[in-house]
């Protein structure tokens, strides 16, 4: 339009400018941008700070010609309705994005399924994706072993099933369950029950077995339990079953905050006050814990840090195809609020 002022296009930041800010050579900046693993970690951090300060964005098309990589990795989430209401998965995406965005790597979020498996394998083998992160697979899922056996770059959330050799990142599930047991017993609770996650999930198994073993060590051998599926609705149904069979329970460990969110109103409707009559402990320390009534005492797993580590581990596998399989296990912490 006549008289309209048009801002000139913003000049792209160059590698030379980043190098000048970082006080290193252009070649060093290039090695950091292209994720060459031999760069010293302190230098890598200095260059990354300069990248953030200058707003540099890699030319992905040019870089792909040099590295022969797509510059994209897949984040495969379980194909379940609950992912849209479970804050866990949003935390995973947030943690992963914090690593890939500064590097100019695209994160392709997809849902698991048989057709997804076929496309994912094809994209990895044909170079349209550089690697994949698999979140919350179950014992019958063929995808982890399929990718591992093909020696494609892949990292798993949680420990693998059986003896599958695949890099993975997890929290010490049993240690987290022990923290819950010690807290409940420390409050004097002895008629304690637990709601597990789905027992096709290794994390759910580890939390259940870890909790019951810890309670036995603390002198409480009989711990009733029932199974949920990590959703709020399943937590409510499980609490109803437990109360029908054990109306005098005085402690409850729930294997996810979202299930605890469903269980608390059931306790209230049954006339059981929390925490006066029943102490309730969850697992995750998600946003669900804060909206519970009362706010939920819970085991915290550092989901964002774990997701970031999964990305870093995957990128290292992409950079070094022959690197050995490895695992990173984070320590849980305990967050005391008003429910226990």
Image (spheres, rainbow, N blue to C red):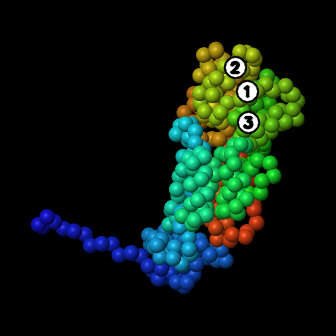
Q: Looking at the rendering, which quadrant does residue 89 occupy?
A: top right
Query: Mark 1 — residue?
Result: 226
**Residue occupying the point 58% across, 39% down:** 80
Could you tell me how far apart the alpha carbons at marks 2 and 1 are, in whole angstroms?
Answer: 8 Å
Mark number displayed over residue 183: none
Residue 303 x %, y %: 63, 49
SS under mark 1: strand
| Residue 27 sits above or below residue 191 on the image | below
Q: Earlier in the sequence, mark 2 or mark 1?
A: 1
Relative depth, front residue between 279 and 287: 287
| Residue 23 sits above or below residue 258 on the image | below
Q: Earlier in the sequence, mark 1 or mark 3?
A: 3
Residue 307 shows in the view: no
Query: Mark 2 — residue?
Result: 241
Image quadrant where one finds the N terminus: bottom left
Residue 61 x %, y %: 46, 73
User: Is residue 331 toward the left or the right of residue 59 in the image?
Assistant: right
**Residue occupying the point 73% across, 36% down:** 199
**Residue occupying the point 12% across, 67% down:** 3
Is label 2 in contact with label 1 (beta carbons under 8 Å)? Answer: yes
Could you tell me how far apart the alpha carbons at marks 2 and 3 are, in whole angstroms?
Answer: 17 Å
SS under mark 2: helix
Relative depth, front residue between 39 and 144: 144
Which of labels 2 and 3 is toward the front?
Answer: 3
Image quadrant where one finds the C terminus: top right
Q: Looking at the rendering, which quadrant does residue 336 occupy?
A: top right
């Amino acid at each position: 339009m006549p008289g309209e002022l048009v801002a000139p296009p913003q000049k792209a930041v160059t590698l030379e400018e980043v190098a000048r800010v970082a006080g290193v050579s252009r070649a060093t900046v290039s090695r950091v941008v292209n994720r060459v693993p031999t760069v010293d970690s302190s230098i890598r951090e200095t260059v990354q700070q300069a990248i953030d300060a200058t707003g540099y964005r890699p030319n992905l098309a040019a870089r792909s010609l040099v590295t022969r990589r797509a510059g994209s990795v897949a984040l495969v989430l379980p194909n379940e309705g609950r992912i849209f209401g479970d804050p866990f998965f949003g935390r995973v995406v947030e943690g992963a994005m914090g690593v890939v965005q500064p590097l100019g790597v695209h994160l392709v979020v997809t849902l698991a399924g048989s057709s997804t498996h076929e496309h994912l394998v094809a994209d990895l083998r044909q170079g349209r994706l550089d690697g994949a992160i698999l979140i919350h697979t179950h014992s019958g899922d063929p995808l982890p072993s399929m990718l591992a056996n093909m020696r494609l770059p892949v990292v798993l959330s949680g420990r693998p099933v059986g003896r599958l050799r695949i890099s993975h990142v997890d929290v010490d599930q049993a240690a987290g369950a022990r923290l819950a047991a010690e807290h409940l017993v420390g409050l004097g609770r002895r008629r304690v029950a637990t709601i597990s996650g789905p027992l096709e999930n290794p994390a759910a198994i580890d939390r259940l077995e870890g909790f019951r073993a810890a309670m036995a060590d603390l002198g409480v051998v009989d711990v009733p339990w029932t199974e949920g599926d990590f959703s709020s609705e399943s937590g409510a149904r499980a609490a109803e079953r437990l109360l029908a069979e054990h109306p005098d329970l005085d402690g409850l460990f729930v294997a996810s905050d979202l299930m605890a969110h469903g269980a608390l109103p059931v306790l209230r409707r049954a006339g059981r006050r929390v925490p006066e009559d029943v102490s309730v402990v969850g697992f995750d320390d998600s946003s669900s814990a804060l909206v519970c009534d009362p706010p939920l005492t819970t085991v915290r797993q550092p989901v964002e840090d774990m997701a970031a580590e999964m990305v870093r581990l995957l990128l290292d596998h992409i950079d070094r195809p022959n690197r050995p399989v490895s695992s990173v296990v984070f320590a849980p912490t305990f967050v005391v609020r008003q429910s226990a």
